[in-house]
Image (cartoon, rainbow, N blue to C red):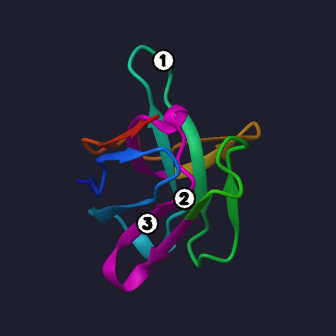
C-alpha cells in the first residue's frame, strides 16, 4: 500500500521561503517519477512540479517557475519542494504523488494521495 506523508507547511509572510518534504513508502521510490500538486479549497488540484526517477529531468508549472525547486533523495525515499519568494496566491494544501504524463499533463499515477500539508502565505 502506497503511503505518502507530507510535512513542512506553515504560515509564512509574502517573500519568505519554505521547504516541504514528502516521505514515501509502499512503492519503488527510486524508479518513480514524483511530483507536487496543490489545491485551494473549492478548486481543482493543480500541478506544481515533477522530477524524474534519477532527478535529471524536471518540469515546473508556469506559476512557480524560477521560484520553486523540486528535488529528491532516493536513499531516504523523500521528495522535497523548496519554495522561495512566496506569494499569497501560493496559499494551498500541497500534496506529493507518483506521477505519469497523459496527453501533455501530469497526473497521479497510483491514485494515492497523502494528507497534504497546508501552506499559508500572508500579504
In this picture, residue 85 sits left or right of residue 2: right
Q: Quick one: SS at disc 3?
A: strand
- Viewer-closest of 111 and 46: 46
Q: Residues within 10 Å of mark 2 (few under 14, many from 20)?
A: some
Q: Residue furthest right?
A: 104
- Viewer-closest of 108 and 63: 63
Q: How many marks?
A: 3
3D distance between C-alphas at marks 2 and 1: 23 Å
Residue 64 horizontal/vertical position (percent): 64, 48
**Residue 84 numbered mark, or none:** 2
Residue 17 horizontal/vertical position (percent): 46, 59
Q: Residues within 10 Å of mark 1 (few under 14, many from 20)?
A: few
Q: Quadrant of residue 104?
A: top right
Tell me the residue at 56%/72% (across/down). Answer: 53
Tell me the residue at 68%/64% (across/down). Answer: 58
Q: Earlier in the sequence, mark 2 or mark 1?
A: 1
Magenta-colored span: 70-98
Amino acid at each position: 500500500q502506497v503511503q505518502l506523508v507530507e510535512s513542512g507547511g506553515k504560515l509564512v509572510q509574502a517573500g519568505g521561503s519554505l521547504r516541504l518534504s514528502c516521505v514515501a513508502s509502499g512503492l519503488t521510490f527510486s524508479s518513480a517519477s514524483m511530483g507536487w500538486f496543490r489545491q485551494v479549497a473549492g478548486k481543482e488540484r493543480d500541478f506544481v512540479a515533477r522530477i524524474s526517477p534519477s532527478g535529471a529531468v524536471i518540469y515546473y508549472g508556469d506559476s512557480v517557475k524560477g521560484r520553486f525547486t523540486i528535488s529528491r533523495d532516493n536513499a531516504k525515499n523523500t521528495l522535497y519542494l523548496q519554495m522561495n519568494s512566496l506569494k499569497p496566491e501560493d496559499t494551498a494544501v500541497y500534496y506529493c504523488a507518483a506521477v505519469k504524463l497523459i496527453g501533455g499533463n501530469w497526473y497521479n499515477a497510483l491514485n494515492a494521495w497523502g494528507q497534504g500539508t497546508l501552506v499559508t502565505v500572508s500579504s
